[in-house]
Amino acid sequence: MGNDGLTLTGSILIYRLYDVAWDIDLKKVEERVREFKRQSIERKRFSKAFEFANPPLSLKLKSFEKTLSGKQYLINAYAKAYDYGVLTIIFELPIKEMEIMEFEALARIIDEPLQEDFLQELDHLVCDLGDALHNINRQKMAEDYTVYYWRHSAPPASADDLMRTLDVGSLLLYEEGEIPPKRATTEQLLSVNFSYSDHDLVVLSWDRAFVLEPSGSMDIPDLLEFANAQLLELRVYDDMVDRELNSINERLMTEVPPSIWKIKRYEKLAARAMRTVMDLTGITEKIDNSLKVTEDVYYARIYSSALSLFKVKEWETSIERKIIIVSRVYDMLYREIANKRTELLEVIIIVLIAVEILLFLMM
């Protein structure tokens, strides 16, 4: 099947996910915005595969127009607020009866021109949400993701037909300034795809996805966003535990050799180490429990594959390993404190005995 006369209808969804706070009070967010809805899985035959602990809040932002490659496009803007401190900003560029070559050209240039728009929306949103954001994170670590979302083509074509017509592999692997990927690389990418019927298709990569969904359901893009939000938070807390370990190690180095006169300093270090363990254990459990996969159905397989592709389990393992290290530091400090208290008690006893002897001799 050639691509002469073939047009596409759908959208390009560009995501920016930002860690903006320690947590977000979603009830307060609801009080501060007009248009919102709670995240849910729309298609009932797949919805039973998931259980949301505290579904994120979806917010409608103001649409705007943007000139891309000399042509004016409408950009619809949305946001999502997650209770564990993530804000997502989504720019949707609707596509109606666009030829494949024009679509491919647009897909390759769309990210860069929107960078400043994302940052402006983020600043406005953080300001508007105010005290709904607890302990604002000024660093704002981020993740980005893009979904090429098609509803249908004209004339109608099956998923297999479109795969032969569009170079999906190159589209998902494209990086400006880099050489095109080898055929074997694109074939490996395309070998991991998902289809529920002959007319829908999902192909995943690290920072992009191709979704053909005639029903118009946004469940799959939402699930991919959710997986990216989990990845972002795990990156944030991995960085946090790294900084805490470095800080504790530096403090320990300044307290060497241990001394009975430094017990208070050791107590502060031990308390800090224990607080780090408790905070990180609590937040990682919150992330893990935010969305539970209960059955191995179509959506669940896509979600699990995204988590695997994003190496979420590896990030979790990294954090768990570092938490164990911090716990051991706490145990070491606790033992050192106990030893120094014993030494201090022995010194006090010796001093008291010496005082008693002196008093006796002076009598």
Image (spheres, rainbow, N blue to C red):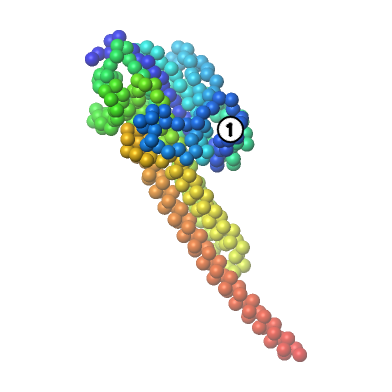
Nearest the camera: 323 or 284?
284
Q: Residue furthest top?
A: 5
Q: How many marks?
A: 1
- Residue bearing the label numbered 1: 29
Q: Residue at x 47, y 23 (%)?
A: 91
The image shows residue 103 at horizontal and vertical percentages of 37, 16
Check the picture and name the quadrant holding the N terminus: top left
Q: Quadrant of the C terminus?
A: bottom right
Quarter of the image for residue 296 reads: top left
Q: At x 39% / y 42%, what residue is drawn?
A: 312
Quarter-of-image position of residue 94: top left
- Residue 164 vs 258, above or below: the answer is above
Side of 130 where 178 appears, left or right: left
Left or right: 174 with respect to 269?
left
Q: Residue at x 38, y 23 (%)?
A: 148
Name the residue: 66% across, 83% down: 353
Residues 74 and 201: in front is 201
278 relative position to 206: left or right = right
In the displayed structure, would residue 212 be above or below residue 318?
above
Q: Is residue 230 visible?
A: no
- The outermost residue toward the right is 363
Q: Position of residue 23 (x, y in %)?
A: 55, 40
Q: Would residue 256 be seen by someone viewing this image from the given angle?
A: yes
**Of 169 and 354, the residue lying toward us:** 169
Q: Residues within 10 Å of mark 1 (few under 14, many from 20)?
A: many
- What amino acid is found at the position of numbered circle 1 in the picture? Val
Vertical position of residue 230 compared to residue 276: above or below: above
Q: Position of residue 202 (x, y in %)?
A: 32, 28
Question: In terms of secondary structure, where does tag 1 sit?
Answer: helix
Q: Nearer the viewer, residue 92 or 258?
A: 92
Q: Position of residue 182 (x, y in %)?
A: 26, 29
Q: Is residue 103 left or right of residue 259?
A: left
